[in-house]
Amino acid sequence: MGPFNIDFRRLLLLLMLGAIPILAINTQRQATDSKLLAPFAAVVSLVSNSYANFSHGVRETASLYINILNIKTQNQSLQAENMELKARLTQFDEILHENERLNSLLDFKKSDNLELVAARVIGTDVNPDYDTIRISRGTHDGLRPFMAVISTDGAVGYVFRPQARSSQVLLLSDRNSVVDGHVQRSRARGLVEGHSRDKLKMTHLLRADDVVVGDIVVTSGINRIFPKGFPLGKVTSVEKDAYGISQNVDLEPTANPYSLDEVFVVRKVLKDFEEEPVEEAKENKDVKETKVK
């Protein structure tokens, strides 16, 4: 560094530091302002004000940042509390719904017409030859082959292969299943045969029989497996043979066994079942599936 290369910033800093005690002495002595020190006093005042403003800005920024962090933390806490409240509300709704369904099942089981055994659906068999489910009741509970299996929505199937503590139930949708039924509105009678999981066929209907889309087909009680009047399915299509004497009728099963948690096995028919319109029965009982514990 040459002899004339002066660091003005360092020189200014030294002058400011030197001026501070002089200004302090002058203030204590209450002397008149010195024209010589006036420029230094202005510089010191400017620096002091700048530092104060900067410090105030830093404090405000820090305070704002802390407030933002606090708000974020509170927001996360509120979100967690909201999720917990929603979960509890869902649980309460499920408990209420479960209670309503249990009450409906109890009313259904108290029927004076039938002696019923409640059973849980514990599995679906994978045997390709049969369309079946497995239930939690067996010969130990008094079950025998060909006992009807029903739900609050209608007929499901019948006991196929009972074991000591469980039973295989052949479903209405199985191709080997045949149930005698009639159209609830017109009393037209035929056989309801299994076709697929979502379709049943009603056969042996005469061409002149009164069947229309939307009709409900119920058990006739003639084959002595199912009690009379239990819903089998709803008519979805009707095709009359062009030159024959019969008609082809497709049904949608009333009960979906693959969505059931429980069923009832009809162990004994105590007296004739009085047939009731399906829509009215559902409105009066408001019955749905539930778990039997």
Image (tube, helix red, strand yellow):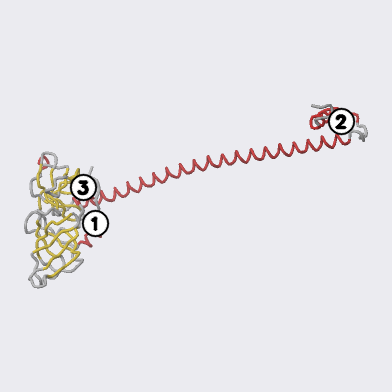
Tag of residue 262: 3
x and y, in percent, of residue 253 in the image: 18, 57
x and y, in percent, of residue 88 in the image: 39, 44
First in residue order: circle 2 vs circle 1 = 2
Q: Rate crowding at label 1 as few (under 14), some (14 to 19) or many (20 or more) other CA atoms within 10 Å.
A: some
Tag of residue 285: 1
Q: Hey, what amino acid is under mark 3?
A: Glu
Q: CA distance from mark 1 to mark 3?
A: 17 Å
First in residue order: circle 2 vs circle 3 = 2
User: Judging from the image, what secondary structure is the residue with disc 1 in?
Assistant: helix
Q: Is 68 located above or below residue 269 in the figure?
A: above
Whether pointer 2 and pointer 3 mark residues with C-beta atoms closer than 8 Å, the reply is no
User: Judging from the image, what secondary structure is the residue with disc 2 in?
Assistant: helix
Q: Hey, what amino acid is under mark 2?
A: Leu
207 vs 92, nearest the viewer:
207
34 vs 256, nearest the viewer:
34
Identify the residue at image location x=87%, y=36%.
39
**Residue 71 lies in what quarter of the image?**
top right
Q: CA distance from mark 2 to mark 3?
A: 96 Å
Classify residue 70 as left or right of residue 99: right
Q: Hey, what amino acid is under mark 1?
A: Lys
Tag of residue 23: 2
Considering the image in quadrants, where does the C terminus appear? top left
x and y, in percent, of residue 281 in the image: 21, 60
Q: Is 187 located above or below residue 81 in the figure?
A: below
**Residue 272 lies in what quarter of the image?**
bottom left
How many numbered discs? Answer: 3
Select label 1 or label 3 by which is in front. Answer: 3
Tag of residue 64: none
Identify the residue at image location x=42%, y=44%.
85
User: Judging from the image, what secondary structure is the residue with disc 3 in?
Assistant: strand
Q: Is 1 located above or below residue 200 in the figure?
A: above
